[in-house]
Amino acid sequence: MSSLEVKDLHVTINGSHILQGVNFYVPENRVTALLGRNGVGKSTTLKAIMGLNPGTGSIKFGGTEIIAVPTHKIVQMGLGYVPEDREIFASRAASWASSALQPLL
């Protein structure tokens, strides 16, 4: 498992400067939580790490700079993002999900 380091991360969306100088470090083999009230930039931060919201600054994963790396390459490196909304399988029927999960139950 590789460490994650974010330095001076800035993200602007539709002319609004959403993230302004975010800094944090996630040590190897540790669980880290990103906490805050609604609208403070938690999802924007995670999307920027995954390359879904372009930003400036530095994002390193396992010592490799990933701020300009395409999302699919970031995923191949071992990072992932599961959105909090419940529309992950929006085009699938509930019966499909139920039958797909049946072997796991």
Image (spheres, rainbow, N blue to C red):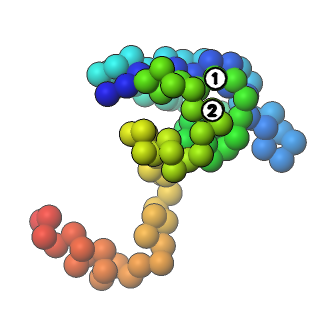
Q: Which residue is mark 1?
A: 58
In which quadrant will I find the N terminus? Answer: top left
Q: Counting other residues with Cα less than 10 Å from the Cα at mark 1, is it few (<14), some (14-19), or many (20 or more)?
A: some
Above or below — where is 29 with respect to 88? above
Distance of label 2 from label 1 (alpha carbons):
6 Å
Q: Counting other residues with Cα less than 10 Å from the Cα at mark 2, is it few (<14), some (14-19), or many (20 or more)?
A: many
Q: Amino acid at mark 1?
A: Ser
First of labels 2, 1 by sequence position:
1
**64 left or right of 11?**
left
**28 left or right of 36?**
left
- In front: 36, or 93? 93
**Which disc number belongs to residue 10?**
none
In which quadrant will I find the C terminus? Answer: bottom left
Is residue 38 at least partly visible in the picture? no
| Residue 4 position in % (x across, y down) | 47, 24
Above or below — where is 57 with respect to 50? above
Corner quadrant of residue 101 = bottom left
| Residue 89 position in % (x across, y down) | 43, 70
**Outermost residue, right direction?**
15
- Label 2 element class: loop
Q: Amino acid at mark 2?
A: Ile
Q: Circles 2 and 1: CB distance less than 8 Å?
A: yes
**Which disc number belongs to residue 67?**
2
- In front: 49, or 99? 49
Residue at the spot 57% in from the left edge and 32% down from the top edge: 66
